[in-house]
Amino acid sequence: MSATDLTRLNAAEMATLLASREISSVELTRAHLARITQVDGIVHAFLQTLPEVALREAQTADADRAAGEQLPTLAGVPIAVKDVLATKGLRTTCGSRILENWVPAYDATVVRKLREARLPVLGKTNMDEFAMGSSTEHSAYGPTLNPWDTKRVPGGSGGGSAAAVGAFEAPLALGSDTGGSIRQPAALTGTVGVKPTYGGVSRYGLVAMASSLDQVGPCARTVLDAALLHEVIGGHDPKDQTSLDAPVPPVVAAARQGLSGDVRGLRVGVVAELGGRGYQRGVLDRFEEALASLEGLGMSVREVSCPSFKFALPAYYLIMPSEASSNLARFDAMRYGIRVAPAEGPVTVETVMAATRAAGFGDEVKRRIMLGTYALSAGYYDAYYGSAQKVRTLVQRDFENAWEDVDVLISPTTPTTAFPLGDKLDDPLAMYIQDVATIPVNLAGIPGISVPGGLAEDGLPVGVQILAPARADAYLYQVGGALEAALHEKWGGPLLDQAPALETTTQEGGAL
Ligand code: GLN
């Protein structure tokens, strides 16, 4: 098999060929490193690649397998990791200047789990600074481009992970989702992204943005691949106080069940408030078709109203900055990252801290720190933060009411397809609106998946979002798998098969 053919396999297919020793992990890892060399000059999905580390991990996986050791399912399948996750001895920047020299002394729990499951780590992926954004344009290291159209954004904050998977630079990646940063980039790049139940995957070693909303999750090209990765990273972690003390839900079995078309009897609710006005025509058209496919498989469909969702976005933009302003206080020029001396005047703890934060944080991060500090200040706490917390409760109640009538909820993942670079950079509200459909999920702590739903009238991918009750992550994979199988049959293969060849774009000069 040629190197290109290897990178086009799914993770599940790679795992089978590795287990039967028809291919080696070194071969597979080399093929991906070559692909990265070929296209990442254009896509810029990676902030850092780790060829030596990855090849060493691949070699030991191969050697242990050759020695007859029984290895975990995904052993030898390479993966990319969002640069928001701490990697021991390897630079972790969070897309920020302030951490440009930070080398963590420990691995995030999910990274440790990847190592234990023997997945070679190809590199760290680009992201909006501290995961704040919906386009990856807020990275201090330049934007990532959408593999479908290099003049457009791949979504954010995890645009690097989604683009790496969509551009066949990695079969799998890890992301983090505070308000949509796994699902929205998945939608915009024609890939699969999952935000697990809050507490279902450890946050230890995830650089915190808003701790009550943050969740690590899988990025992949298929629902089954996402499930296989979810199984590796999920489960209880005593190092994370909010970790659920429960086994990983049966996500792989659920994905397989769904892929066989078995969703009969499940009830799906269409969220009335997530769709209609403000949503692109082609997004709504593909969404309607996805619904029809699920109905065709024997699912009952009804409309469900979640009236408080209209307040979810404003509530999120009070709660998230409040928590972020508190979390980011740790970047004080003393404990982590860069230290900048003031240009003039006395050198004190305060002036060094101010100079460092002024130089180290980008505009969007500063905006949110100021917003959050304001919302938490004594005179305004009740009016802003307090009210937002009440809305959060209302959003949770809307979901609880919905679960009395349906098993899963469904909506478009985003209002539009991928937008042009620079389009929303000067208009924070336009950027924030991108997450209108993904944010309620984080406020309620429930799981959500985005699955490719087809191409809109502009030829760009559309995402379909499926939501389930807390701890019922398996439903996402069952219904997502069924939808994927039905749509692949309709399209004659995966959506990514229809993406333009990046190599050609490169020759034409791409967007840069
Ligand atoms: N785009 C949203 C924000 O900017 C969500 C980010 C995220 O999920 N990390 O806050």
Image (cartoon, helix red, strand yellow):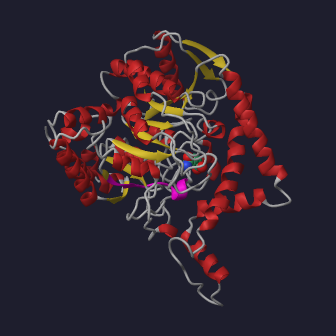
Magenta stretch: give its range: 122-131
Residue 38: x and y in percent read: 24, 52
Is residue 130 on the magenta stretch? yes
Q: Is residue 426 above or below residue 234?
A: below
Q: Is residue 153 visible?
A: no
Judged left or right of residue 240, residue 52 is left
Residue 368 screen position, x and y as percent: 65, 58
Task: Give residue 73's quadrant in the image.
Answer: top left
Q: Is residue 55 above or below residue 290?
A: below
Quadrant location of residue 329? bottom right
Residue 270 x %, y %: 60, 21
Residue 192 makes an appearance in the image: yes
**Image location of residue 4, percent across then percent down:** 19, 41
Q: Is residue 348 above or below residue 316?
A: below
The residue closer to the viewer here, 55 or 165, is 55
Q: Quadrant of the N terminus?
A: top left
Q: Residue at x 44, y 48 (%)?
A: 110
Q: Nearer the viewer, residue 114 or 435?
A: 114
91 relative to 252, above or below: below
In reply to whether residue 89 is colored magenta, the answer given is no
Which residue is at 46% across, 51% downward? 109
